[in-house]
Amino acid sequence: MAEAVAERSGAGVRRSHSAAVGWTAAIVSACAFGTAGAFAKPLLASGWSAGAVVAIRLALAATILLVPGLVALGGRWHLLRSHWRPLVAYGVFGGATAQVAFFNAVQYVPVALGLLLEYLGILFVVAWVALRSRRLPSRLTLAGVAVAIIGLVIVLDPAGMTGLDPRGIAWGLLAGCGLAVYFVVSAQPMELPPLTFVGVGLGIGALTILVAGLAGLMPLYGGTADVAFVGLTVPWWAPLVALALIAAAAAYALGFVGVQYLGSTVASFVGLTEVLFAVGWAWILLGELPGPGQLLGGLVLLVGVAAVQRGQASG
């Protein structure tokens, strides 16, 4: 009897530890992803194409993760062959498609609407999990979904947008599909070490964009002129390195760990906090002060995320 109690107690401690690791990794990942707009904006404003920024961002991140990833692999090359499908899906859709489609979307629609369309991908995650498990989400989970989406809409404030271009809507929905694939693939059981999986996956994403550029399907161009950033004039490579280190290498690696511990549904809703962090980083780095509506929407969004987590835990 005592052994059974001790075993249950140990299992509870392990679950609590796993949840703590998952939440910490997912939130820090969202914070890192939230810097992307602030770091990319000076490059895009100076004439860089979105495809070039994303390609170099992914390629540098893959290079940074290559050495520790290979060390963690320990010569088990067969694991790369056995995981080629999730690697390709992660790189092509979760890395290249989601980012390039979003940057293309905001060329035709306001950034707020582009973000809203991309984060509709979390609904695709909920639908996919329900189809795979053949079980509808709990009422609490569904309520959390609704509250989180309402909070997101309040934060982004897409009201009053007129003259919407259908091309922007299409690109935004494609970005949402890429985001959904990112969460679903990351949640699969993996024998590959996280750094190996993320490094190779991002390398595949960068290669995909390069091939698309060489085929004339995507413009790839940049420059070497200094750029304006946080009130300073800095070399062009400074925000690009920050983009690769923080908004790619750290963000994707921690995001993968978060999804592995939390599952695709909860992690995708925790990922919504990226919007809040993006608003905060824009305030700190670009001087774009958030309004009271964004602060209220952020609180509503977090309530929805908490409800989804509780619904999944009790489901």
Image (cartoon, rainbow, N blue to C red):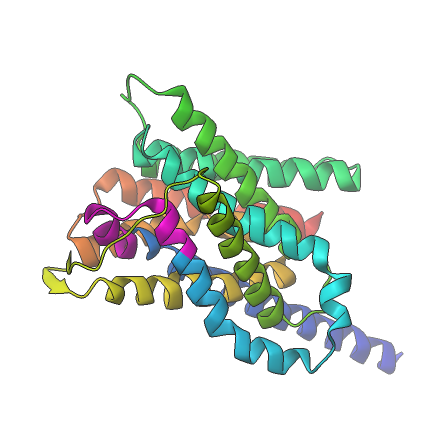
Q: How many marks?
A: 0
Picture residue at 28% right of the left edge, 49% below the top = 279
- Above or below, comparing residue 210 to residue 59 in the picture: above
Residue 304 shown in magenta: no
Q: Main secondary structure of the magenta part?
A: helix
Front in this rendered view, residue 106 or 184: 106
Picture residue at 41% right of the left edge, 35% below the top = 116
Q: Position of residue 308 (x, y in %)?
A: 57, 46
From the viewer's perspective, tell me whether residue 1 is left or right of residue 235. Answer: right
- Above or below, comparing residue 24 to residue 123 in the picture: below
**Residue 79 visible, this angle:** yes
Residue 17, quarter of the rendered image = bottom right
The single residue placed furthest to the front in the displayed view is: 215
Residue 49 shown in magenta: yes
**Residue 304 visible, this angle:** no
Q: Position of residue 163 (x, y in %)?
A: 29, 16
Front in this rendered view, residue 125 or 42: 42
Q: Position of residue 230 (x, y in %)?
A: 15, 60
Q: Which residues are magenta?
A: 38-55
Picture residue at 36% right of the left edge, 47% below the top = 220
The single residue placed furthest to the top in the displayed view is: 163
Picture residue at 34% right of the left edge, 20% below the top = 164
Residue 191, quarter of the rendered image = bottom right
Viewport quadrant of the N terminus: bottom right
The single residue placed furthest to the right in the displayed view is: 1
Front in this rendered view, residue 279 or 315: 279
